[in-house]
Amino acid sequence: MMEIGNRKTDHINICINENVTPGYCYWDDIKLIHEALPEIDMSEIDTSVQLFGKRLEYPFIITAITGGFSGAIKINENLAEACANLGIGMGVGSQRASLEGNEKKSFEIIKEYDLPLVIANVGAPQLIKQRDKTAFTAEMIDEAIEMVDADVLAVHLNFLQELVQPEGDTRAKGCYDRVREICREHRVLAKETGCGISRSTAERLKGAGIIGIDVAGMGGTSFSAVEMYRAQRAGDFSRQRIGETFFDWGIPAPVSVLWANVGIPIIASGGIRNGLHVAKALSLGASCTGAANVVLKEATLSANAVEERIQDIMSELKTAMMLTGAKDVRQMTSREKIITGKCKEWVQRCE
Ligand SMILES: Cc1cc2nc3c(=O)[nH]c(=O)nc-3n(C[C@H](O)[C@H](O)[C@H](O)COP(=O)(O)O)c2cc1C
């Protein structure tokens, strides 16, 4: 219990205090076209969106961050209160620790808030047997969903993190079959954790029966970077070097939004830091956007701080919508864009 709390606190502190994102901002490679004569009033702009049958006031959710230790109670409460006030969705962090018998209140607390969309969270590696650990049972999956009264279950794909952290779960064979099995019983969102999802993987996941994809592409929080700092502090130079080598591993988030679009809703995430990034992600075809790091510091302070941060981002989104002549989110998704820089190279080479 103590160790889990320490690891999760480390993740939060490192993400707040250290540079955990690659230097290059891939969202800057997407350029929207300015509309000098929009013929829309700012007050008319409708930012609402439907996602998984739920109405969100903005095309933005807080993606999985934390839970499973007492220090996370206030963080999740702050996030839930802000998301409920704003009318947006919220994901919780991995529920593994709680499913294995540790602290639960940090997850259960969010049931006290009227959230339009709640996303539970388990890791794909925990769906299969790992060395000395048994696989999550069907009952444990049910429990994860009930713990937060979730509308959707996110199965996170985090093999980079598992490979660079000490004692990570490094078996992957059988995850696909387990995801397919869970999809028969539940509404499942496949979610990366910073490395993006390719076209072929998106197609396989769709075949398994998932209802959406959160790309969590490269360019935002890098768990390889997080583990690099943890290893550095522990004086483990080999792990530090692995973390450094894979710091910017993955498919850039905007590229993954394009590639993973296989006809089911896409949540664009990975380095979303402002409302212009949100607008750009929508223009690439995302149904919604999501972020974790951008509200992390605020989440440790107060619900009000989280709410204000998101409100600023949504004001920027509305500004971008007006300046591109998009009256609503549907129009924003069909806006013209130009893909430049490294993203252009990725898109040209592989599609
Ligand atoms: C401190 C922290 C903890 C996270 N924990 C989880 C987790 O438990 N499960 C998960 O699916 N994603 C987790 N993530 C990943 C985020 O949900 C998101 O996919 C990723 O950070 C990319 O978004 P960002 O660039 O906005 O941070 C975590 C992110 C952060 C910053």
Image (tube, grey):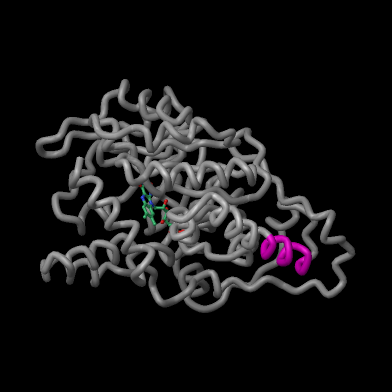
- Who is closer to the viewer here, 53 or 255? 53
Q: Where does the magenta region start and end? A: 315-324
The relative height of residue 75 versus residue 249 in the rendered view (above or below) is above
Tell me residue 173's x, y (percent). Answer: 22, 40
Identified at 60% across, 60% down, the residue is 278
Task: Judge from the rendering whether residue 56 lies leftward or rightward of residue 340; answer left or right.
Answer: right
Q: Is residue 58 visible?
A: yes
Above or below, 201 relative to 296 = above
Instruction: Give the residue at x 24% y 62%.
Output: 227
x, y percent for residue 233: 17, 67
Q: In this view, which residue lies farthest toward the right?
A: 39
Q: Is residue 323 magenta?
A: yes
Which residue is located at x 50 percent, y 67 percent?
Answer: 347
- Do we see residue 169 in this rendering? no
Asked if residue 216 lies left or right of residue 6, the reply is right
Drawn side of residue 20 relative to residue 126, left or right: right
In the picture, measured across the screen, residue 115 lies left or right of residue 229, that is right
| Magenta-drawn stretch contains 56 | no
Q: Main secondary structure of the magenta part?
A: helix
Residue 242 falls in image quadrant: bottom left
Between residues 160 and 349, which one lies in front from this camera angle?
A: 160
What is the x, y in percent for residue 146?
42, 25
Q: How many marks?
A: 0
Which residue is found at the position 59% from the left and 33% from the top? 114
